Amino acid sequence: MSLLPLFCEMKMARFHLLKDPDNYVLYDWDLVQDAESLAYWLEHFEIQFRQALQCAADTYGSEPDGPERIAAACAHFDRILDYLRLHPDSLPGGTLGVYDICRLREVALREHGIGDPFACLKDRENRLAIDCYPRTVENYSALTGRDRWLALVKGVFAGNLFDVGSPAGMESHDVAPDFFHSIDNVRPRPWFVDGFDEFYADLSAPGGAWSKAVVFIDNAGSDFILGLMPLVKELAVCGTSIVLAANELPSLNDLTAIDAQGCLNELVKLDTELAGLVAGGVIEIVSSGNDLPMIDLTNVSDELDVAAEGADLVILEGMGRGVESNFDTVFSVDALNAAVLKDTQVTRHVGGQLLDCIFKYTRAG
C-alpha cells in the first residue's frame, strides 16, 4: 500500500502576508519521532472517524448505497491507519504530522462520496446559536471599553469549546453547549498565553484600530456565531474592514465559506447594525481554498490573497489553524492566535494544561 499518490495537492497562492514564506513551517511536530503521540493520534483518529460516520448516517444513510459507502469508507481508513502504525515514515520526507492524518481522513471520506459527515450536526448547532445571538450581543452592549473587549475575548474562548475534532468536543457533540455557562467557566487571567493588554492598547490608541483584518474562522455553531462574530462586529464598528476566510470544502464541523455566508445571512436579519456593516461591504466572506482543520498558508486561494491586500491584522481562531499549525508563524503585519486547548497531546506539546486559553498577540516585526 502506498500513500504517496494521496499527497499530490494542487498548488495555489502563497499568502502574501507571511513575512518569510520561503522558511514557513506549517507544524513542528513529527510523530515519527514521538512514539507516544503517534499511538495517541492514530487511536484518536480511529475513534473520531467512527463517530463521524455515525453522524454521516443522518445525511447519507437514507441514500440507496449510503450504508455501503459508509462501511467502505470505514474499511478504507482502517487500512490507512494500520499501514501508518507499521510505516509511519512512509510519507514524502519521511515525517508524519497530524495535518497529514487529517488529509488521509478526508481522502477516505471523499473517495466514497461522504463529503460532509457533520452537515446535520452543523445545521442544528447553527440554528441553536442563531437563536441565542440577540441575547449575546445585548449582553455585550451593556459593557463599555476594556470590559466589553475582555468579555468579547472570553466569548471567543467559550465558543471555541464546540469542536468535534477534540476529545472533549467528541464526547459532548450530541448535546448543545451552553454558551453562557461556558463564558462563566473560561479560565481567569492571566491566560496560558496572554497578549490581551497589548492587543487592547493598540486597539484603543488614537488612530490605533486596524484598517483591515483577515480572520480565519473555525467551527460552526456557537464558535462562529456567538464567539467570533460579536468580536468581528465590534472590530468593524471601530473601523476595521473584515475578511472572513473559511474553508472551501468541509472538514469536521468547520464552516465552509458557503456555510458561513448562510449564517451571516441569518444574523443580519436579527441585527440591524451588523446588517449595515455587511451591506456597506465592511464584512465579507471568502474561501481560503482550504479543506482541513489546519491550514497551510503557502497554499491558499487567489481569492483570499487578493482580498487580504492592505490588511494589517491576521487573526487565526481555533486550535487547528492557530496552535496545531501556525502557532509560531511570523507575519508582516500584526497577528492574533486565539484558541482553547482541548486535546491532551496538543496541551503536552505546547506545555500548557487542558482548557488553557491562548491569546497570542504579535506586533508586526
Image (spheres, helix red, strand yellow):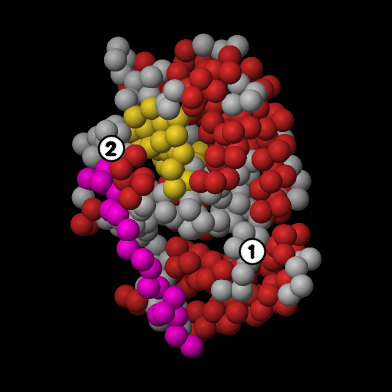
The quarter in which the C terminus is drawn is: top left
Residue 99, horizontal then vertical, whole percent? 45, 63
Does the magenta portion include 336? no
Distance in Å between CA atoms under marks 2 and 1: 38 Å
**Mark closest to the chain's N terminus, 2 or 1:** 1
Q: Which residues are magenta?
A: 1-19
Mark 2 or 1: in front is: 2
- Circle 1 residues within 10 Å: few <14, some 14–19, many ≥20: some
Does the magenta portion include 11? yes
Tell me, yes or no, if residue 303 can be seen here.
yes
Indicate the quadrant where residue 333 lies.
top left
Q: Amino acid at mark 1?
A: Gln
Looking at the image, is 301 positioned above or below residue 1?
A: above
Q: Which residue is mark 2?
A: 309
Residue drawn at x 36%, y 16% is 204
Residue drawn at x 47%, y 73% is 35
Q: Amino acid at mark 2?
A: Glu
**Do the CB atoms of the residues marked 2 and 1 lie less than 8 Å apart?**
no
Kindly state the secondary structure of the residue where label 1 is placed: helix
Residue drawn at x 51%, y 56% is 249
Farthest residue to the right: give it.
Answer: 62
Residue 247, horizontal then vertical, whole percent? 48, 51
100 left or right, relative to 93: right
208 left or right, relative to 343: left
Residue drawn at x 60%, y 79% is 76
Looking at the image, is 102 positioned above or below residue 270?
A: below
Q: Which residue is mark 1?
A: 48
Residue 69, horizontal then vertical, whole percent? 68, 75
What secondary structure characterizes most of the magenta part? loop
